Amino acid sequence: MLRSIGRLSPFAARGAAAAAAAAAGTALCFADRPASCEAPKLELKYFDGKGLAEQSRILMALSGVEYTNTRWKMDMAQPYGKRCPTFVEAQGNGSIYMALDRAPVLIADGVAFGQSKSIERYLARRVGLYGANELEAAQIDSFGEHLRDLKDLHGKAGTDTEAADFKAKVLPAWLAKLERVAGDTKGCVVGNGLSLADVQLYYFVCEHFPARDAYMKGPNAKLSGDGSGDPVATLLRECPKLAASVVAIRDHPRVKAHVAGRQYTAPW
């Protein structure tokens, strides 16, 4: 039987495995376990770039669950508003009205809805990356909201002086606090298994934070950090629990294959 949109994943079925992992001190990837229901019919629609859909794509890559990854090609040489004819067509034919004619859009078993965070959380529940119980699901939500607040602060650092202050003071202070929040199981920040929270942390450290500076400042911009090119080493050298989580996602074979295969036509 298919899970409905409103239901959480069968947390109770993972309890024994989570307890065993806690005793061993090692993070599980619940997505590697056999599915307990029929394969979902999922289609994610978004522009041919990272943007607001990449965390969902990485989550799905980690899970190994098959889905349709529809990417609307972009022609960045065209003026704004004419760069993605397929998106304009979708707005015109009413196929993305449930997202208020915006993107991303997820179609799950024939039901369409929008909002990137709603999509991420639904997919995490659907593929078993939303914790072992409802309390862990709430902790995953909380961790993700902390990261969203940190992204907002980063986005407000518009001048070189503000960016330097964010990098030198704000970011280290917030990461130190998140290190305290993270759980004690090596390789994951909540509970005893990889989850949406680990994907979100990976994306912030390895993709959002370094890439935003490059996108805003141009192709010759350096990575945020000390210039070594390794965000984990530069940003998380004082945060071993966060670093272990990021490495667990970054080095997962399915995530590595997804990242290596990206050839997006949009720069963001």
Image (cartoon, rainbow, N blue to C red):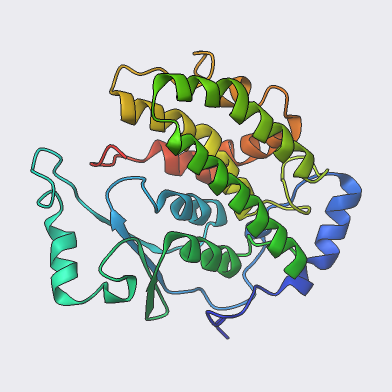
Give the quarter of the figure containing the N terminus: bottom right
The residue at 54%/22% (across/down) is 165
In the image, 33 versus 160, the foreground residue is 160
39 w.r.t. 53: above or below: below
Picture quadrant of residue 137: bottom right
Position of residue 245 measured from the top left corner of the image (x, y, whole percent) = 67, 39
Image location of residue 212, percent across then percent down: 40, 33
Q: Position of residue 5 (x, y in %)?
A: 52, 79
The C terminus sits in image quarter: top left
State which quadrant residue 98 falls in: bottom left
Dividing the picture into quadrants, the one containing residue 223 is top left
Residue 24 located left or right of residue 263: right
Across and down, in percent, residue 13 comes to 77, 72
Q: Is residue 102 above or below residue 222?
A: below
Toward the viewer: 192 or 236? 236
One can see residue 91 in this view: yes
Please tell me which residue is depicted at 15% across the width and 53% down the height of the picture: 84
Seen in the image, is 197 located left or right of residue 212?
Answer: right
* Residue for point 55% across, 51% down: 62
Q: Residue furthest bottom?
A: 1
- Regarding residue 133, the answer to whether it shows in the image is no
